[in-house]
Image (cartoon, rainbow, N blue to C red):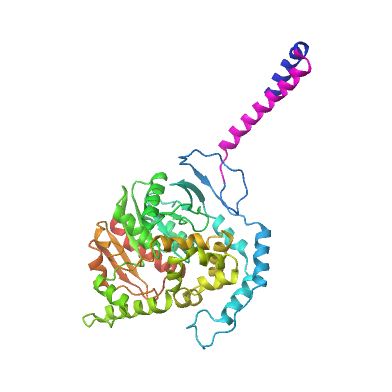
Amino acid sequence: MQLERAYHTAKAPIRRIFGPLSRLLFVLLGVAMFLTSSAAVLAQQPAKTGALIAGPAKVRAEKDVSIRPFSINAPEEVLADLRRRIAATRWPDQETVSDRSQGVQLATMKELVRYWATNYDWRKAEAKLNSLPQFVTTIDGVDIHFIHVRSKHPKALPLIMTHGWPGSVFELLKTVGPLTDPTKYGGRAEDAFDLVLPSMPGYGFSGRPKVTGWTPERIARAWAELMKRLGYTRYVAQGGDWGAPISSAMARQAPAGLRGIHINLPATVPPEVAVVLASGGPIPAELSEKERAAFNSLDTFYKKYRAYAAMMGTRPQTIGYALMDSPAGLAAWMYDYNNGEPERLLTRDEMLDDITLYWLTNSAASSARLYWETMGQSVLLATAQKTAEISLPVAITVFPEEVYRAPETWARRAYRNLIYFHEVDKGGHFAAWEEPKLFSAELRAAFKSLR
């Protein structure tokens, strides 16, 4: 209204002096003023990033450190296209064996995909995420999506937890309640955590790096910056799968405020054992019973169940074409992990939440590049993960259906400041997803001395 009054006040004398030309000049001036004002307003509005998010883009400075609210709303036409692609699946012929030794069996995949197209509801998964406080912030040139849940208990210990592949933040959601509000789940107020659950670069709703170099070490530095940006000066970190080497890298880097880490896929394999595994040699005679069991599990995993890592570690772009053009192909690729662990220990809806997230965010290739960045380096080898360089406190929980059961003898040799080691009786690779109550209890016990 002020702009309009100013315009009318000035218009009469200007018209008498300059005539029609002056009116044109004044209109152009008014348009310029309006555009300048609109740009200023847009610059102050929070941005919502991601292909599935509708909202105004934010004009951000090159070194913007703002934290922007985030929510998810997948367009219905994208979900309809997914269903159409599922219906058009071109199936291979049936496996020639009676077990899953050739991979996920045809009958299993057909049933999973049928359910995906007809009964599965992504909106329920979307609602789970949107029920939690989600944000995006730009770190090292990449938008980082994260969930941040503050406990109602005043002395909660901040904890940053990192997912892995083929997982996502979905695998951690069941722990939010038990960890942030332990009194509601049979725990004590002094056991509470503030939770920070980021999506790794190239995964989920985080941005996809446009340059190389996003290794666990670089992600670890980004996580330290995230915790600093959130105002935490004292915190702990946790991870399984890729979350383990990222948390371990944080421990090696020892950023200000990090008190210790908990991992459930530790890098304990000694160098002399790693050499035998790589060469395909016989099991070393000097190993104890638990060490022999670990050796046999690793030997089987490397020989039979790690083809996905070899492919993604050498040709992530090549496999990306197949995975992002075929929903059924993506589902089979992820469903086969650890000899079909998702089929054994997760519900169909749980795994389809995760698979659909990868599909909707088009992140099969970008997530696979993390394997290429590490040149196929195993996350299980003590030497490769430089565990000898970690001086901060380390806690380990061993779950029985993990890729291997890390022996305590190997763990104490790998981590010189091991403050907690415990073997539990159930759970596997996706421990937080599969056994959230047990997993949460383990974290409370593991970090008790660091509060």
Classify residue 304 by image quadrant. bottom left
- Residue 95 lies in magenta, yes or no? no
Is residue 306 rendered to the left or right of residue 287?
right
Locate residue 63, reporting x and y percent. Answer: 45, 40
Q: In which quarter of the image is the C terminus?
A: bottom left
Residue at the (78%, 18%) spot, across then down: 20
User: 368 or 262: nearer the eye?
Assistant: 368
Tell me: residue 33, above or below residue 410: above
Is residue 14 rendered to the left or right of residue 222?
right
- Residue 30 lies in magenta, yes or no? yes
Magenta stretch prevailing secondary structure: helix
Residue at the (56%, 55%) spot, across then down: 130
Locate residue 448, reporting x and y percent. Answer: 31, 59
User: 171 or 224: nearer the eye?
Assistant: 224
Tell me: residue 142, above or below residue 96: above
Q: Quadrant of the N terminus?
A: top right
Is residue 15 rendered to the left or right of residue 39?
right
Locate residue 100, reporting x and y percent. Answer: 49, 83
Locate residue 239, reporting x and y percent. Answer: 38, 62
Confirm whether residue 1 shows in the render: no
Residue at the (58%, 77%) spot, across then down: 109
Classify residue 212 by image quadrant. bottom left
Tell me: residue 337, above or below residue 17: below
- The range drawn in magenta is 18-47
Residue at the (55%, 62%) spot, across then down: 357
User: 51 or 291: nearer the eye?
Assistant: 51
Confirm whether residue 405 shows in the render: yes
User: 374 or 343: nearer the eye?
Assistant: 374
